[in-house]
């Protein structure tokens, strides 16, 4: 890394306050990895959960442990500048700036063609498409949303993504589609452009809506940047097979200038979807994706980018979702991986090029379909659930290897906020911590709102 790039990163971390939060993860996360070797047992966590009233609406939208409180904000349908409305299907989210008490978050919306772009023309990729991002400013001292604006739209199914060390958000399209006629959400649309790309969104203003083509044309899920190297790691939400990728930028921190896309390979182990013992470690290699732009050929699922990687010896996962880098480790989840087909948590160590199966759920009653993940500033991981059942939780994976329930979706509405129905089966997404560790932010995808949770956090849990 050039000295100027290192200085720029340090200035950003100090200005944003994110350095303090990152530093806290060093010890505890290492202890979490040390426990890998047997399936994680249960952990009492913060104790039993029970319904807690939202400080915004007064409704018991969540179940939480004793002593924790929360407020909801950024509901679907709320007004946005430009005579627009807040889109729904809230998904990935991250904090891209911290100015004193004011935190700037960028939130994905996994919407398809709907009613068309909700952003200004300069921030619109393809007019008929209604996915994109909203940027929100939250006052962490007062505990309230200050304002929100559209920052990218005209995209499709912006599922997850990730923050960068230089203070931007990477928003990922979880679809591969060619320009032309397509049926989405039960309606026919005429796309003007191909879809299946990563877009960069700044902390201020709006995105230029230009795809980062070199980062591949596939079913993108999450993206995370190793702050030590500038390498971007990417997950692919696809089955029956998915790849784990890395992007080596030509110029660190300037992704638009291109780079190389590669797929992970464990030599002699082509299939990592099931049949492996927790704690197993493998040496890792990387194979080239010669044509990252050839994704439209992948509409049948097993050609295009993933086919290139597998042909070159890349290893198969299934439905890769959350991805987060910290403490010299890149964690990622496989939603339906493992012998019970209900979830794996993986840990990749860039320094020694090693992959480890950190956790595997033995049964859907323990953990079913882990999705977005984030490292806690106190250690351990927060795991968002996207299960097929009628209960959706946020879990903690403690530093001593124990899994515990932290929160449960309890949303039932009778006209409040303009919605009516039982939404308690809607997935969690977008978990992220404030730099001081006081607030845990997360999203409930349906009917679409964000929450900020605070309470008696403890070191060694989350």
Image (cartoon, rainbow, N blue to C red):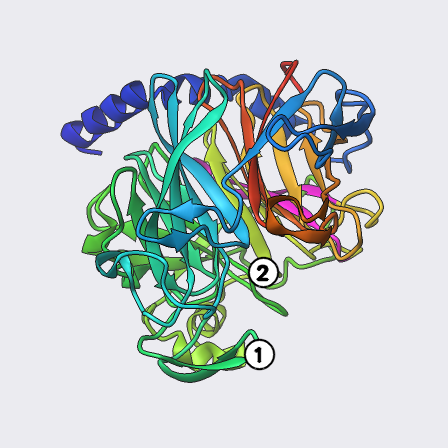
Residue for badge 1: 186
Image quadrant of residue 229? top left
Residue 182 rendering spot, x and y as whole percentages = 46, 82
Residue 387 rendering spot, x and y as whole percentages = 73, 53
Residue 38 rendering spot, x and y as whole percentages = 77, 36
Question: Alpha-carbon neighbours of circle 1 within 10 Å: few (<14), some, or many (≥20)?
Answer: few
Of the 4 image quadrants, the one containing the C terminus is top right
- In the displayed structure image, the side of residue 338 where residue 93 appears, left or right: left
Tell me if residue 316 can be seen.
yes
Magenta stretch: helix, strand or loop mostly: strand
Q: Which residues are magenta?
A: 341-360
Residue for badge 2: 268
Local secondary structure at mark 1: loop
Tell me if residue 223 can be seen.
no
Q: Residue at x 36, y 63 (%)?
A: 117
* Between 94 and 333, the one nearer to me in the picture: 94
């Amino acid at each position: 890394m050039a000295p100027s790039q290192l200085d720029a990163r340090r200035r950003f971390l100090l200005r944003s306050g994110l350095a303090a939060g990152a530093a806290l993860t060093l010890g505890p996360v290492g202890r979490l990895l040390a426990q890998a070797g047997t399936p994680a047992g249960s952990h009492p966590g913060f104790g039993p959960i029970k319904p807690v009233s939202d400080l915004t609406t007064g409704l018991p939208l969540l179940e939480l442990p004793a002593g924790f409180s929360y407020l909801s904000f950024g509901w679907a349908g709320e007004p946005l500048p430009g005579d627009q409305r807040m889109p729904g299907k809230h998904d990935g989210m991250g904090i891209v700036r911290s100015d004193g008490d004011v935190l700037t978050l960028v939130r994905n919306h996994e919407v398809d063609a709907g009613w068309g772009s909700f952003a200004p023309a300069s921030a619109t990729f393809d007019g008929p498409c209604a996915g994109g991002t909203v940027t929100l400013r939250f006052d962490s001292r007062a505990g309230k949303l200050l304002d929100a604006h559209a920052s990218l739209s005209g995209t499709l199914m912006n599922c997850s993504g990730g923050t960068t060390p230089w203070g931007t958000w990477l928003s990922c399209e979880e679809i591969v589609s060619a320009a032309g006629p397509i049926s989405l959400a039960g309606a026919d649309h005429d796309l003007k452009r191909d879809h299946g790309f990563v877009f960069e969104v700044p902390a201020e203003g709006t995105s230029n809506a230009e795809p980062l083509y070199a980062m591949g044309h596939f079913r993108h899920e999450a993206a995370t940047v190793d702050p030590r190297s500038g390498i971007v790691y990417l997950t692919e939400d696809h089955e029956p097979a998915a790849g784990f990728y890395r992007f080596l930028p030509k110029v660190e921190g300037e992704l638009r200038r291109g780079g190389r896309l590669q797929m992970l390979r464990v030599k002699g182990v082509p299939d990592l979807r099931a049949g492996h013992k927790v704690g197993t470690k493998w040496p890792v290699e990387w194979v080239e994706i010669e044509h990252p732009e050839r994704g439209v050929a992948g509409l049948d699922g097993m050609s295009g980018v993933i086919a290139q990687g597998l042909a070159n010896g890349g290893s198969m996962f299934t439905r890769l979702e959350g991805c987060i880098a910290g403490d010299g480790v890149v964690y990622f989840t496989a939603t339906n991986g493992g012998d019970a087909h209900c979830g794996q948590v993986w840990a990749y160590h860039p320094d020694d090029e090693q992959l480890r199966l950190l956790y595997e759920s033995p049964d859907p009653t323990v953990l079913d379909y882990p999705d977005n993940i984030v490292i806690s500033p106190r250690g351990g991981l927060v795991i968002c659930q996207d299960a097929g059942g009628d209960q959706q939780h946020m879990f903690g994976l403690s530093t001593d290897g124990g899994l515990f329930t932290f929160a449960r979706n309890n949303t039932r509405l009778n006209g409040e906020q303009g919605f009516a129905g039982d939404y308690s089966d809607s997935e969690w997404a977008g978990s992220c911590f404030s730099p001081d560790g006081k607030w845990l932010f997360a999203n409930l995808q349906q009917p679409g709102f964000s929450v900020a949770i605070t309470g008696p956090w403890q070191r060694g849990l989350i």
